[in-house]
Amino acid sequence: MLAQEIIIRPIITEQSMMAMEDNKYTFEVDRRANKTEVKQAVEELFDVKVEKVNILNVRGKLKRMGRYAGFTRKRRKAVVKVAEGQSIEIFGADDAE
């Protein structure tokens, strides 16, 4: 897979913003990608050194509309720890300060 296909989008929540202080960045990734592929994709796209990758599978939530029930789609999140002194600029952490 190409790096652009593996990294779908950054996940920006309160919890992920607090983790950015520890050089941890959260992305939604392709459900077929493994830790090695995520590491290579982040290093290629953002030109940083990745120390560690944690993967979480997020199941879909049950949603109801009247008598009809369905599920939101399943997702896969990756929490990527980059080397000390490096950062990923796509999150705009420097602008928020």
Image (tube, grey):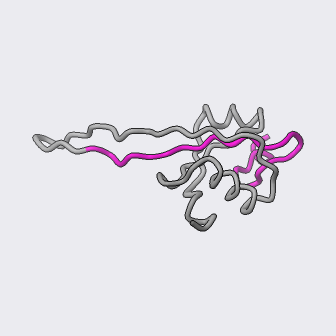
Residue reaching furthest to the left: 67
The quarter of the rendered structure image containing the C terminus is top right
Question: How many numbered marks, from 0 up?
Answer: 0
The quarter of the rendered structure image containing the N terminus is bottom right
Residue at 57% in and 49% down: 34
Q: Position of residue 68 (x, y in %)?
A: 13, 44
Res 85 quadrant in image? top right
Q: Position of residue 46 (x, y in %)?
A: 75, 58
* Highlighted range, magenta: 71-97
Residue at 77% in and 34% down: 21
Q: Position of residue 77 (x, y in %)?
A: 54, 43
**Residue 96 versus residue 89 in the image, above or below:** above
Residue at 87% in and 39% down: 84
Is 57 magenta? The answer is: no
84 relative to 68 in the view: left or right:
right
71 relative to 86 in the view: left or right:
left
Give the camera-side residue of 9 and 33.
Answer: 33
Residue reaching furthest to the right: 85
Give the camera-side residue of 44 and 71.
Answer: 44
**Residue 57 versus residue 88 in the image, above or below:** above
Is 75 magenta? The answer is: yes
24 relative to 57 in the view: left or right:
right
